[in-house]
Amino acid sequence: MALISQRPFISIPSLHLPTVNPSARFSCLSARLNSLETVELKSSKKEYSPGVIDGVFLNVFRSKMAQEAGWDSEKPGYDGLIEMSHRLMVGRSNSEATEAAVRILIALFPPLLLDLYKKLISPIGGGKVAAKMVARVTAISCQWLMGTCTVNSIDLPNGSSWSSGVFVEKCKYLEESKCVGVCINTCKLPTQTFFNDYMGVPLVMEPNFEDYSCQFKFGVGPPLPEDDSALKEPCLTICPTANRRREIKGTTDVSKCPKA
């Protein structure tokens, strides 16, 4: 600053900085996402052990669910959350339960954040950047709810592959709720709707009701209801209601889950 003040009449030529190509900026962001693959969660058969931050996530999620349901369980922690997920289905149709669950997900985020993500991030690179970002955030932040998760590569309808999948080894939410209908109407359908409509990221979730695993595919839209096999699943063998129906009917054949 001292040198400039001593020679006030010298004209300093303007600097012409090179224009940054937006596509180059997007490529840089994508490269950063790819670099995260080296530090992503590794596949593990060990049960996920929640930490302090996970407890915060659970309490926040549960408080939003209680506000929506107008009721809170007396059971502590995760057990209370599962009881509330069943309560969310009481007195509501399947579509009403799904809409309620969508409202709970929306309440977890600042509205402005969702709008900005949908308008500014989701269009980048044909949706690839946004899909990869939410896959990583989901795998890291939702293990308290679902159990061990890993980011994996998925195939898109156009033949390309993106590392925008999340594989849940054994979904704790499904196993503890013991209900296909709770899985579909309070998790699968509302989560798909939330990401597609409010974040601009297509998503299909493919739960496996035999081993309780689940494959998230960010960047792939859900099928039509009539083509979604998950919506036609019979009750789980661990479902207490289904077991009572089996005892009454005297048969192991239980038709489509009545809550689905």
Image: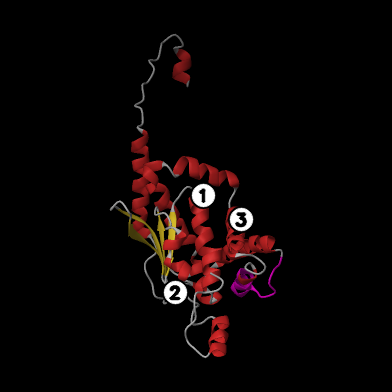
| Residue that extends furthest to the top in the rendered view of this protein | 9
Q: Distance between the residues labelled 2 and 3?
A: 26 Å
Specify whether residue 10 is painted magenta. Answer: no
Q: Nearer the viewer, residue 56 or 109?
A: 109
- The number of callouts visible is 3
Going by the image, does 23 lie left or right of 194? left
**Residue 105 rendering spot, x and y as whole percentages:** 57, 57
Q: Residue at x 42, y 52 (%)?
A: 133
Q: Name the residue under label 3.
A: 103
Q: Which amino acid type is shown beneath numbered disc 2?
A: Phe
- Location of residue 75 (image quadrant): bottom right
Coloring applied to the structure: secondary structure
Question: Where's residue 192, x and y in %?
Answer: 49, 57
User: Label 2: few (<14), some or many (≥20) within 10 Å?
Assistant: many
For mark 1, give the secondary structure.
helix
Q: For mark 2, what is the residue? A: 209
Which residue is nearer to you in this view: 16 or 113? Answer: 113
What is the crowding at mark 1: few (fewer than 14 residues within 10 Å), some, or many (at least 20)? Answer: few
Q: Earlier in the sequence, mark 2 or mark 3?
A: 3
- Residues in magenta? 71-85
Q: Label 3 sits on what residue type?
A: Arg
Q: Which amino acid does label 1 sit on?
A: Asp
Q: Mark 1 points at which residue?
A: 197
- Name the main secondary structure of what is drawn in magenta: helix
**Is 217 placed above or below 26 here?**
below
Q: Of the residues under marks 2 and 1, which one precedes in the sequence?
A: 1
The answer to which of marks 1 and 3 sits earlier in the sequence is 3
Q: Are marks 2 and 3 in contact (CB under 8 Å)?
A: no
Find numbered disc 2 in the image and state the secondary structure of the residue it sits on. loop
Which residue corresponds to the image point at 55% horizontal and 63% vertical from the top-left? Answer: 53
